[in-house]
Image (cartoon, rainbow, N blue to C red):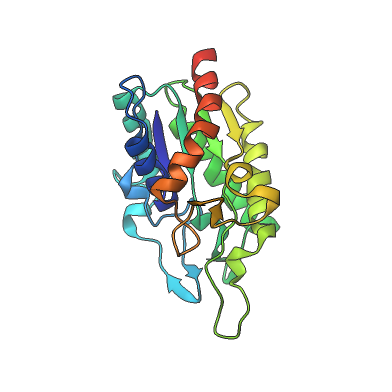
Amino acid sequence: YLLAGDSMAQTLGFGLNNAYTSKAHAFVAVDGEATGCSLVGGTMRVKGFLVPTARRCSTGGPRGWPTRWPKLVRRVHPLVVMLLFRLDTVDHRLHGRWQHVGEPTFDCVLTSGLVRAAAALSATGRPVVLLTTPYYDTAEQANGAGWPEDVPARVTAYNALLAVVAAQFPGVIHVVDLNAIVSPGGHFARTIGSTVLRWADGVHFTYGGDAYVLPRLLPTIEQLGRSA
């Protein structure tokens, strides 16, 4: 199995590798070049800080994901490829103004990026799973309000786009609802029972969270791989 994406995928993948030791399954976690990247590109606004898209996140050149991912898939020959991103839900500077998922122009750019990513990852015809992004809670601003990128409606809008993209690749691209696994009742959850799922930053997965996700996620992934 290959797990691609940003630091969300990285923390989920590291834990999966740590928790699942059977020689029958191996998670390649992650294409580290995508950490801190977005499929949208441009300048991002994360918790009030302006974050320019790194050169290594470029959609062109040998280190850009459209070039790297098809080569990686051909080298690894995974049973299933999974994709997970966080930074597509934050504000981006597009066409001279700040925009976010749920706005028509932004959604068009993001959908185009998702389609390109899906095409790159399915280069060998193996099934590709788009994991829904979970809810986030990155604490409060100084005035007590939450950060705009943590609004649940953004996650809902993003996850809806995944279904639109999957419909363009029937039988190849599938959506698996990671959000439903880690957000019981449709709300952000840092813990479930005694298990701490997410780091204190309200974004990344802990090893304990990975161990919780694994038995709830892997059977669906395995079934897709076997059916292919």
Q: Position of residue 84 (x, y in %)?
A: 49, 44
Q: Position of residue 127 (x, y in %)?
A: 50, 24
Write the residue at 70% across / 56% down: 104
Q: Can you see residue 127? A: yes
Q: Can you see residue 117? A: no
Write the residue at 36% across / 24% down: 25
Q: Look at the picture and state if 62 lies above or below 36.
A: above
Please identify the residue farthest to the bottom as the structure is shown: 143
Q: Is residue 83 left or right of residue 133?
A: left
Q: Position of residue 69 (x, y in %)?
A: 37, 36
Write the residue at 47% across / 35% down: 214
Q: Name the foreground residue: 134 vs 127.
A: 134
Q: Name the foreground residue: 20 vs 126.
A: 20
Q: Is residue 58 left or right of residue 203?
A: left
The number of numbered badges drawn on the structure is 0
Q: Position of residue 201 (x, y in %)?
A: 46, 64
Q: Quadrant of residue 181?
A: top right
Q: Name the foreground residue: 146 vs 62.
A: 146
Q: For the N terminus, give its image quadrant.
A: top left
Write the residue at 45% across / 55% down: 204
Q: Look at the picture and state if 228 lies above or below 178.
A: above
Please identify the residue farthest to the front as the structure is shown: 194
